[in-house]
Image (cartoon, rainbow, N blue to C red):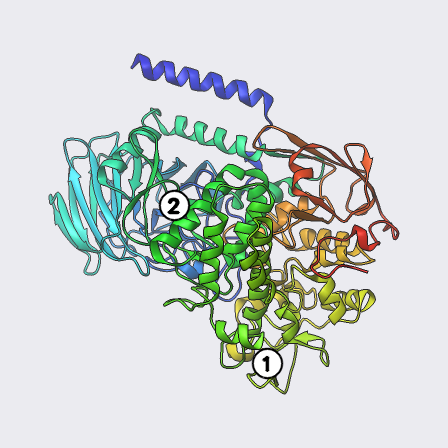
């Protein structure tokens, strides 16, 4: 007891000391941001995540049915459980899920009968703490650790008190230990997971229960006083006295029951009660959020910024654990073996190569370095580089963007992996089609090499694939050139201009093309979605030439015509045709609702487009449009996003853009300039160096960069390099309400393009 008291006093003293130096930034985060979503229109497709940064598990209230991708929807008025979660998108559902639900009065075990109504007025949703008082008087609180959580249930004085464990809709095993006041077991659920993949859990109650039993979900059959059960949809329940307050420490492991117990002891053992766990989690988050300290601006802007920074700090998810000696190891979902080292999952590179990983390179280079080696481990374990991991490699979406991460890490000095092996793995990826998913290898790879494009309609989404393959081949070329590998540099150099082969000069768009070279379809409409494009239309994919904007400018007729084409995205009608989708999908509805012409920021393909003005003689338009998108499309409410948040990508777009930066072409070391949102921002890098971004005179009206200097040296470039940023110092802007029509207009001021500007 003396040790516990001493620990608590030490913790309190440390927190008080740090708090005196740090502003409370956690207060600005609303984890309900983006939760007002449904199948037809998404405002983020998020749920009120309670977690630590990049934690292996998160926790959330559950309003949706077991197995539904819609875990939590703001419009719903009842909760059926508080669940361990991993989901990175409503479209991916979840895996290895179980939940706890407090019940008062008569025992109810089934997910529908135990559901209890609630109001958002009685809900607190923060990164380190979720709390809700249900209409039946039960109060539930949750605070997280990396591989577990601390829960507290406060029951009303009248009626019996129960806690129901739901093993969800797959295989589950439960065991009730009446002497130790705990429940142990495992669950296996989720698409593509075999029975050998298990999430072992330990639930330790601080209060004795006097009754208990197991139950089976399909028929909702209870077995009173039964202490163990195993099978599909199994669960358990325990009974407490009326009016009791019960705390439960929960941890789990993918490796073994013993590791689950070790995770519990290591992560939750130091904390005597939920308040201590909550305080520790707050400190972790406040330290994390203080890595980017924004000053000035409105309270609403700060809430939006830190809510987005929170979302940008959840994925990719740690999937490794620490053995008794503190060494990392993990159970691989790709070969079902235990390996030493680090492992990460729950991300799709089609989304996150664009901004989430370039942000991580800035803030978390050590983690990014570990991630690079982990990607090569995936290659060893399943024969393919990752593209969409959840938790195993699924090969979803399009492109082979692992090479983007490799090249981007290397050019930024993160060199923790063997580049020869990375190039070998990418070459294998680019010259084969794997057994699952369009991004497991390459659809149409032979034709891509022989014809210079992927033919449509033979290959679904062929034009989008051609464009993304060409960018990926540039990244392969760049990595090979940087590491002196002439063979691979020559191979990929032949393909990185293939974007030219799907450009139709007659229409001014990237189009589908059949094997004979004919443009398809003949009745072309750039507002028609699907067909040769992925979740978009010709208006959106025209700009997917990240590595050669100057080359794209030439195709469109030069600088002036390129700017006119950019302008026309915003002045075009916001109407659309459903095309091969045959119905209105939510991305179409979101573009229509945002009412910015054909600018469909709610999906990833066009998110970089506003920054392409920085490659032209009118860079001030990038400043205007970046600021306008931040203002119009983001806030900290349940309606906070213009579409799917997608594993931190859309949030990372906002975080980088609020700094006045964006990584248009990962695989280069450049961050393109936009318009900083706050008068002052201090970025603290991993090594302690700081970059102070001062935007003098910044306001909603003064959004244009009049002049810029770095550490007292004026510059006119429309980009900064990674080394310039992480070296720290003072980046100073003078802001104006009118564009500076001379700054950044020369070709030497423009960011990198394969084709040199003239």
Percent position of residue 221, x then y: 16, 56
Query: Which element is circle 2 on?
Result: loop
Percent position of residue 696, x then y: 80, 37
Residue 549, visible in the rendered structure = yes
Q: Residue at x 14, y 31 (%)?
A: 179
Residue 160, visible in the rendered structure = no
Percent position of residue 242, x then y: 25, 35
- Which one is earlier in the sequence, the residue at label 2 or at label 1? 2
- Identify the residue position indicated by label 1 in the image: 513
Query: Which element is circle 1 on?
Result: strand
Q: Quadrant of the N terminus?
A: top left
Q: Is residue 413 left or right of residue 264?
A: right
- Name the residue nearer the viewer: 96 or 558: 558
Q: Residue at x 37, y 13 (%)?
A: 6
Q: Is residue 9 left or right of residue 235?
A: right
- Name the residue nearer the viewer: 569 or 78: 569
Q: Nearer the viewer, mark 2 or mark 1?
A: 1
- Name the residue nearer the viewer: 393 or 758: 758
Q: Quadrant of the C terminus?
A: bottom right
- Name the residue nearer the viewer: 526 or 162: 526
Q: Which mark is residue 738?
A: none
Instruction: Tell me the distance, in whole angstroms, between the alpha carbons under discs 2 and 1.
Output: 59 Å
Quarter of the image holding residue 716?
A: top right
Q: Residues within 10 Å of mark 1 (few under 14, many from 20)?
A: many
Q: Is residue 181 left or right of residue 752?
A: left
Quarter of the image holding residue 105?
A: top left
- Identify the residue position indicated by label 2 in the image: 135
Q: Where 144 sits versus 457, above or below?
A: above
Q: Residue at x 54, y 80 (%)?
A: 456
Q: Where 481 sits versus 267, above or below?
A: below
């Amino acid at each position: 007891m003396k040790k516990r008291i001493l620990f608590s006093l030490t913790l309190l003293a440390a927190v008080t000391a740090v708090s005196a130096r740090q502003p409370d930034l956690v207060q600005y985060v609303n984890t309900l941001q983006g939760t007002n979503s449904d199948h037809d229109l998404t405002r983020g497709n998020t749920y009120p995540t309670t977690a630590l940064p990049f934690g292996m598990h998160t926790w959330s209230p559950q309003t949706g049915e077991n197995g539904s991708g819609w875990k939590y929807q703001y419009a719903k008025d009842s909760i059926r459980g508080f669940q361990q979660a991993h989901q990175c998108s409503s479209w991916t559902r979840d895996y290895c899920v179980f939940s706890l639900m407090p019940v008062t009065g008569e025992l109810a075990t089934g997910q529908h009968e135990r559901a209890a109504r609630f109001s958002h007025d009685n809900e607190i949703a923060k990164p380190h703490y979720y709390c809700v008082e249900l209409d039946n008087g039960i109060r539930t609180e949750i605070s997280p650790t990396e591989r577990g959580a601390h829960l507290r249930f406060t029951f009303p004085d009248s009626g019996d008190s129960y806690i129901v464990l739901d093993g969800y809709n797959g295989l589950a095993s439960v065991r009730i230990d009446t002497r130790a006041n705990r429940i142990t077991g495992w669950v296996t659920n989720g698409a593509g997971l075999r029975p050998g993949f298990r999430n072992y859990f330990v639930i330790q109650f601080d209060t004795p229960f006097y009754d208990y039993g197991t139950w089976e979900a399909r028929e909702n059959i209870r077995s009173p006083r039964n202490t163990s059960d195993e099978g599909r949809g199994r669960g358990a329940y325990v009974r407490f006295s009326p009016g009791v307050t019960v705390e439960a420490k929960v941890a789990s492991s993918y490796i073994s029951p013993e590791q689950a117990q070790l995770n519990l002891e290591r992560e939750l053992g130091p904390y005597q009660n939920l308040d201590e766990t909550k305080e520790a989690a707050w400190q972790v988050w406040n330290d994390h959020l203080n890595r980017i300290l924004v000053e000035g601006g409105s309270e609403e802007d700060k809430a939006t910024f830190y809510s987005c920074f929170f979302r940008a700090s959840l994925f990719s998810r740690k999937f490794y654990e620490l053995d008794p000696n503190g060494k990392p190891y993990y159970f691989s979902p790709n070969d079902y073996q235990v390996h030493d080292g680090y492992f990460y999952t729950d991300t799709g590179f089609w989304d996150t190569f664009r901004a989430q990983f370039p942000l991580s390179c800035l803030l978390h280079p050590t983690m990014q370095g570990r991630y690079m080696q982990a990607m090569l481990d995936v290659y060893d374990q399943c024969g393919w580089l990752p593209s969409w991991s959840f938790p195993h490699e699924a090969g979803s979406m399009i492109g082979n963007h692992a090479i983007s991460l490799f090249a981007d890490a290397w050019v930024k000095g993160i060199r923790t992996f063997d580049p020869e092996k990375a190039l070998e793995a990418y070459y294998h990826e680019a010259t084969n089609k794997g057994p699952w998913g369009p991004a497991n290898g390459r659809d149409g790879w032979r034709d891509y090499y022989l014809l210079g494009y992927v033919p449509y309609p033979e290959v679904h989404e062929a034009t989008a694939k051609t464009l993304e393959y060409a960018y990926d081949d540039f990244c392969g070329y760049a990595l090979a050139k940087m590491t002196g590998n002439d063979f691979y540099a020559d191979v990929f150099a032949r393909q990185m201009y293939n974007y030219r082969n799907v450009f139709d000069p007659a229409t001014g768009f990237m189009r589908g093309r059949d094997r004979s070279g004919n443009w398809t379809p003949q009745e072309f409409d750039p507002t028609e979605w699907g067909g040769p494009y992925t979740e978009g239309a010709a208006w959106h994919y025209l700009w997917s030439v990240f590595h050669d904007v100057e080359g794209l400018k030439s195709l469109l007729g030069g600088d002036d015509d390129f700017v006119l084409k950019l302008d026309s995205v915003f002045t075009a009608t916001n109407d659309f045709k459903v095309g091969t989708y045959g119905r209105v999908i939510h991305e179409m509805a979101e573009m229509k609702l945002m009412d910015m012409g054909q600018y469909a920021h709610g999906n990833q393909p066009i998110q970089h487009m506003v920054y392409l003005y920085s490659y032209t003689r009118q860079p001030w338009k990038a400043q205007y449009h970046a600021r306008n998108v931040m203002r119009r499309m983001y806030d900290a409410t349940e309606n906070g996003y213009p579409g799917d948040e997608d594993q931190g990508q859309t949030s990372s777009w906002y975080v980088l853009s609020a700094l006045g930066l964006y990584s248009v072409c990962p695989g280069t070391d450049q961050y393109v300039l936009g318009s900083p949102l706050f008068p002052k921002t201090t970025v603290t890098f991993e090594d302690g160096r700081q970059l102070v971004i001062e935007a003098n005179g910044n306001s909603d009206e003064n959004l244009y960069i009049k002049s810029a200097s770095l550490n007292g040296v004026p510059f006119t470039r429309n980009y900064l390099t990674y080394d310039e940023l992480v070296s720290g110092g003072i980046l100073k802007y003078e802001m104006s309400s009118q564009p500076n029509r001379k700054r950044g207009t020369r070709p030497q001021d423009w960011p990198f393009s394969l084709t040199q500007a003239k």
